[in-house]
Image (cartoon, grey):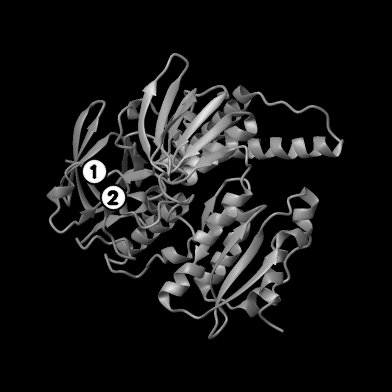
Amino acid sequence: MPQVDVLTIGAGGGAYPGAFMLAAAGYKVVMVDEKGVMSGNCLYEGCIPSKAVREMALALLRKKKFQDYGVLGDVKVDYKKVVAHKDWVQELRYKQHDEELREAGENVSLVKGVAEIIDARTIRVKTDNGDVIYNTKNLIIASGSDSALPPVEGKELCITSSDIFRLHPKIQDVPDTLAVVGAGYIGLETAVMFNIFGSKVEVIEMMPTILPGAVDPVLADMLYKSLDPQIKIHLNSPLKRIEKTEKGVRVHYATPEGVEKTIDADYVLCATGRRPVVPKGIENIPGIKVTKKGIEADESMMTGVQGVYATGDVNGQKMLFHAAVRMSMTAARNIVAGNRPVDKVDVNAIPSVIYTIPEIATVGITRTDAQKMGIPVQEVSFPLEKDAWAQIYGELEGEIRIFLDKRNQRVIGGWVIGIDAGMVINMIGLAVARGLTARDLADFADAHPSIFESVQKAARNAVF
């Protein structure tokens, strides 16, 4: 029976950064992953490939704008080449991850297989060459999440984001028509991309707002009003069933008044959320708590069972790749410290970005949260129509808004809607994480011209 210091179930963001840290500290680490590659769903079918496609869509949109200015001729897109670019990015990053693994040394290895928990110290791994049983001193469960299909008739007719974004995907051409079930971040991001590429897109959402529960309702409404009106969004419209037609699929949904209507499309994308993938045999670890959100873990990523950690999507705290990376590092540090909680993750200070066009990003405590928590808030903002960088690109829509604790002007949160929101939010997130004040942001001399200047200008509205 192979003996290791740490075994990780999964080799994505919740596993490999911490695994490399532990290996560098002299720990013998084995990562077990069903795909047999590092980076998890992020690179396999998630954030990296989807953003590779999204940036091509944004480039096309900007080229069309320059066409309107009269400085560029006809603009067309070859979607097969968009997919080829996405595939190239994925293959490049897989190659780089392989190099990282080799450079990490003999203390860490990656095993392709399916892990089954026998107990907290014993893991059976089903490989192509048979079962291997490992004995481990510490266990990091980083098994990630998977698409959750809606419980309706015809759900097997859906495509998921995997069919669009995985390496060499099923979808190689732009569909004439696309129906999207779910107005969460995956649904909206995909709807925006294919709308730009030329698809007729309709989105149905059972809740009364887009991005339900994901962002502040005020921000969700701002995005809703900013999306291309060619994307038809049906709110308060629950999915009833899906059926196959001669030309594609037919989606049945109910209007807010209860009237059943249909959408005919080439494909129906089901983007109705993700569910944690809990390893088989988890019940063999007494003391582990599993809910609908996933495996319970505290801020130190500890499960309550000595030496057992849950990181990334599987704990449901913040289902984002960069959050998983931070969590894996925390688990590693606490293992090195003898399973003591010397490091903790502040999920409140981890930014969330939704790559629609315009894109939006949030971090920390925003308006609605502050009201519920009884925190006196001072809001400061700056409109992007006055930002030089936004003017250069002709993308004037949006704002930067910072939320301060009125008692001491400490930065407690913020949001950005508009150009480069996913970049700018990191500056506000660092302020939240480090307890900075409006004066700290206002006094920093951001490079000119850059979108970051607007953070400084927003903060200036709170200080002399």
Q: Quadrant of the N terminus?
A: top left
Q: Residue 244: x and y, percent?
A: 39, 20
Q: Label 2's element?
A: strand
| Left or right relative to 55: residue 390 | right
Q: Residue 349: x and y, percent?
A: 48, 65
Check disc 1: other Cα within 10 Å, few if <14, some if 14-19, many if 20+.
Answer: some
Q: Residue 322: x and y, percent?
A: 47, 53
Q: Nearer the viewer, residue 358 or 300?
A: 358
- Residue 141 is tagged as 2
Q: Quadrant of the C terminus?
A: bottom right
Residue shown at the point (60%, 70%) measured from the top left: 402
* Amino acid at pointer 2: Ile
Do we see residue 99 in this rendering?
no
- Residue 249 vertical position relative to residue 237 in the rendered view, above or below: above
- Residue 229 vertical position relative to residue 410 in the rendered view, above or below: above
Check disc 2: other Cα within 10 Å, few if <14, some if 14-19, many if 20+.
Answer: many
- Residue 425 vertical position relative to residue 50 in the rendered view, above or below: below
Task: State the residue lying farthest toward the top.
Answer: 246
Q: Which of 180 and 116 is in front in this view?
A: 180
Residue shown at the point (37%, 67%) measured from the top left: 344
The mark that comes first in sequence, 2 or 1, is 2
Are the residues at dot 2 and dot 1 in contact (C-beta closer than 8 Å)?
Answer: yes
Residue shown at the point (26%, 58%) measured from the top left: 296
> Residue 148 appears in which quarter of the rendering?
top left
| Left or right relative to 168: residue 386 | right
- Residue 378 vertical position relative to residue 85 in the rendered view, above or below: below
| Left or right relative to 165: residue 422 | right
Do we see residue 275 in this rendering?
yes
**Disc 1: which residue:** 279
* Amino acid at pointer 1: Pro
Q: Label 1's element?
A: loop
